[in-house]
Amino acid sequence: MFDGLSSRLSDVLDKLTRRGALSEGDVAEAMREIRRALIEADVALDVVRSFTDKVRNRAVGADVLKSVTPGQMVVKIVNDVLIETLGSDAQTIDLEAVPPVPILMVGLQGSGKTTTTAKIAKRLTDRNKKKVLLASLDTRRPAAMEQLAILGRQVGVEVLPIVAGQSAVQIARRAMDAGRFGGFDVVMLDTAGRTTVDEALMAEAAEVKAATNPHEVLLVADALTGQDAVNTARAFDNRLGITGIVLTRLDGDGRGGAALSMRAVTGKPIKLVGVGEKVDQLEDFHPQRIANRILGMGDIVSLVEKAAESIDAEKAAKMAARMQKGAFDLDDLREQLLQMEKIGGMSGVLGMLPGMGKIKDQIAGANLDDKVFKRQRAIIESMTPKERRNPDILKASRKRRIAAGSGTSPEQINRLLKMHRQMADMMKSMGGAKKGALGKMASMFGM
Ligand code: GDP
């Protein structure tokens, strides 16, 4: 996500980092580039203006001109202003109220509202140990009610039974009663969506709000719709007074404009983000992480976190010990490939490292993508345990068998073997030189 903005900003900032001192002219040039990049990223115009104004005001100052590395200073300022624009601290759903706490879900049809409702219910159940009741208020679309019922079953959360002929307000009241009598902590009300903001939609949601006095009014908005999502947010906020935003489809190739504009336009925090269709693909919104990615200055924190999540510490320790002895066979390589796939493959890793945005593009262009890891793993998995331990015995006939088994060619097998030899040699030489440092590094990368 945010590739466009990220590489545009890094182009500008690369230029600045190469200069000794920062003149007003440099700042002006940088601002022009940043403004263009933000507009291309579909950031709302007034947000672009206030963003660049803020950066300029802080950049053209004594501090910057006196600074040893003006480029870094500007990066820091852009980063700070990005975070301010995105919202300074991560905010989660507020449940501090007398149970059952009503949460009203609003948004356009297709924004991911129903899916997000189920995702939040699952999170509140699993993490917060809350007893959640779901209710669909979409009286015009039986399919939407059915969808919520299916999702509810999938995440193991109770869904209010459908009673034909009831209005949205009647259902909402019934849900609150059921919540009270059933000892629920939270009642989530999934309102009807329309394809565009219309008065009937707003009036109905406002009526439900008045009847249930929700503690949170969460707007679900699709990040891929950029400016439209921002306009939607403004309309919903003006009419209903939202308390927070859930931005969905951040996993798509969103230009990032929506995330950047949302907070500035509505003044309401982005509380959660949807990063996929699955019910567990919901994450906290971390302004710093998003700002880092937008800048392409690297997200070391999330790289380390992600790596830590997926790495089995015991395996890592074992492998580090083997490597220190200079042993690194094809089973070890297979383990490495698996770890790479888990943390999002090459593009996942590179995207989080400083200045790697462009290299990532080149790698994708050279077709050196995650499929390569999968293919290499398939090759190793088509070998016998003996072959994995001792690749030297791999002669032509064995290679043909492995190629057939893994859907590859003997040339691809040779390339893999060559890579393995190089890696094994490198590890052997490193193992001799710096045991302590190598062990640390190896465990960090799950080797
Ligand atoms: P609603 O009409 O607003 O209730 O939207 P739905 O919940 O039915 O979602 C519409 C489609 O978007 C479904 O296919 C969802 O699986 C998908 N979707 C929802 N959230 C996300 C997300 O964060 N990422 C991706 N890639 N798809 C999502």
Image (spheres, helix red, strand yellow):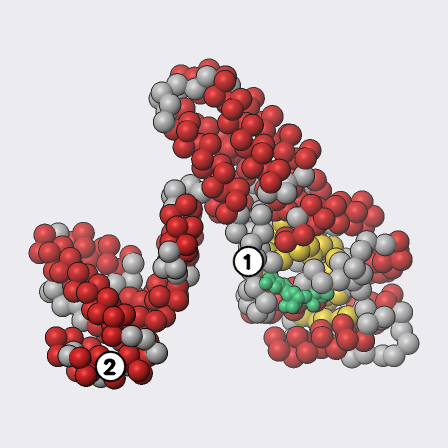
Task: Report which residue position mark 2 lands on.
Answer: 400
- Residue 300 visible in the displayed image: no
> Ligand 1 near label 1 (Cβ, under 8 Å)?
yes
* Residue at the spot 50% in from the left edge and 38% down from the top edge: 8
Distance from disc 2 to disc 1, alpha carbons, whole Å, reads: 39 Å
Figure check: 11 above or below 30: below
How packed mark 1 is, by other alpha carbons closer than 10 Å (few <14, some 14-19, many 20 or more), is: some
Figure check: 257 above or below 425: above
Of badges 2 and 1, nearer the viewer stands 2
Please tell me whether mark 2 sits on a helix, a strand or a loop.
helix
* Residue at the spot 15% in from the left edge and 57% down from the top edge: 426
Ligand 1 is located in which of the four quadrants?
bottom right
User: Residue at the left extreme?
Assistant: 432
Q: Give the quarter of the image for residue 417.
A: bottom left
How packed mark 2 is, by other alpha carbons closer than 10 Å (few <14, some 14-19, many 20 or more), is: some
Q: Give the quarter of the image for residue 265.
A: top right
x then y, percent, for residue 351: 42, 51
* Residue at the spot 24% in from the left edge and 68% down from the top edge: 416
Q: Quadrant of the C terminus?
A: bottom left
Task: Report which residue position mark 1 lands on.
Answer: 251
Figure check: 217 above or below 112: above
x then y, percent, for residue 61: 49, 17
